[in-house]
């Protein structure tokens, strides 16, 4: 696996590959890699001539500085996992390669309602930071396809919007959420759970499954209330548990029995904030 730390070097290398007609699959990550990330790498490897993974913990998308400080960093293990997966290229930039002094990002990306609900509401500024870094990474890597995880469904929609706004020539491939055998969605943040918290954490998956099994047309408030109680009783502090349109994440209070739905949850187990979602129909 080739490892690049400088933006110019990886751009030059990939420009030559592109000129030879090679397709480039890109998997942006913040490291602390797990099998969820590797599933994206595998999807890219099966569809692209070259697979590029980036590991960059982007400071501008953390609305809480403590969360940034505590974000797990396991770069040596990440390199081993990527080599084992046969990833072609790792981009591992220091912060000044992503945000050089002369680089100007738009001061605001017009994300509309998407950044006012759910994660947007509870993490103000988060999606602006995501757009900033993804726009910059796309400029450097210029991939054929970007591979993203359904686990961060709102982020997928935000990046789709970013690509539309910039009319960028890149395809998006959204890959299913990888879970541990007890249902817990794999996440870098799971590393921060102690044994007791880890034992409780699958309740997020159970609450989403409960909604999926019991959803009926009509008002959604009762089922959401029951799911919220399931979580509070286990010790979660719930930011939100919601049912929304799978098309645009508009919240659904009263379901017509037809629209495609997704249930989404974000909750703290003590210091650790976890998110998950599940398509319902
Ligand atoms: P992160 O390192 O958390 O920024 O995630 C990098 C990419 O991996 C994003 O597109 C995530 O949606 C995706 N991802 C994270 N967790 C999972 C998972 N459990 N299954 C599939 N994809 C995931």
Image: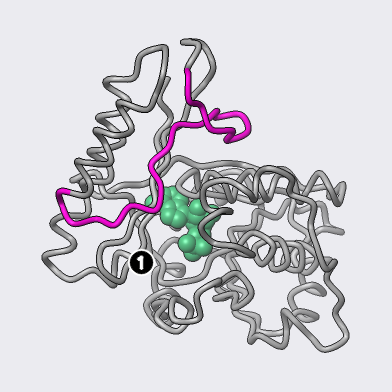
Residue drawn 66% across the image and 52% down it: 49
Camera-nearest residue between 80 and 239:
239
Residue 118 seen from this side: yes
Residue 41 in view (yes/no): no
The residue under the point 66% across, 51% down is 146
Q: Position of residue 74 (x, y in %)?
A: 39, 80
The N terminus sits in image quarter: bottom right
Q: Secondary structure at mark 1?
A: helix
CB at disc 1 and ligand 1 closer than 8 Å: no
Position of the C terminus by quadrant:
top left
Q: Residue at x 42, y 40 (%)?
A: 264
Q: Which residue is mark 1?
A: 189
Where 132 falls versus 27 (above or below)? below
Q: Is residue 238 magenta?
A: yes
- Tell how many labels: 1
Q: How is the image coloured?
A: one colour
Residue 151 x/y as whole percent: 45, 47
**For the magenta stretch, what is the residue range?**
233-254
Residue 91 is left or right of residue 241, and the answer is right
Q: Please name the residue shown 55% across and 51% down the image.
A: 45
Left or right of 194 in this view: 151: right
């Amino acid at each position: 696996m080739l490892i690049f730390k400088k933006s110019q070097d990886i751009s030059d290398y990939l420009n030559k590959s592109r000129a030879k007609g090679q397709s480039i699959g890109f998997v942006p990550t913040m490291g602390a890699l797990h099998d969820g990330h590797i599933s994206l790498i595998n999807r890219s490897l099966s569809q692209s001539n070259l697979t590029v993974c980036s590991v960059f913990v982007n400071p501008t998308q953390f609305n809480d500085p403590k969360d940034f400080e505590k974000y797990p960093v396991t770069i040596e293990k990440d390199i081993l996992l990527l080599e084992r997966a046969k990833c072609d290229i790792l981009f591992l930039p220091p912060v000044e390669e992503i945000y050089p002094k002369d680089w100007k990002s738009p001061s605001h990306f017009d994300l509309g309602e998407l950044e006012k609900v759910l994660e947007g509401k509870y993490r103000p500024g988060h999606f602006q930071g995501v757009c900033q870094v993804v726009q910059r990474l796309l400029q450097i890597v210029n991939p054929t396809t970007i591979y993203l995880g359904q686990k961060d469904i709102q982020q997928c929609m935000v990046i789709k919007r970013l690509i539309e706004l910039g009319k960028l020539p890149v395809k998006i491939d959204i890959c299913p959420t990888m879970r541990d055998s007890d249902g817990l969605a794999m996440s870098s943040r799971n590393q921060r759970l102690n044994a007791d918290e880890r034992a409780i954490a699958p309740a997020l998956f159970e609450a989403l499954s409960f909604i999926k099994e019991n959803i009926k047309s009509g008002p959604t408030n009762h089922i959401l209330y029951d799911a919220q109680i399931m979580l509070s009783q286990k010790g979660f502090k719930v930011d939100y548990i919601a049912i929304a349109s799978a098309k645009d994440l508009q919240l659904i209070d009263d379901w017509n029995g037809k629209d495609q739905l997704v249930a989404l949850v974000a909750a703290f187990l003590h210091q650790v904030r976890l998110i998950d979602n599940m398509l319902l129909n």
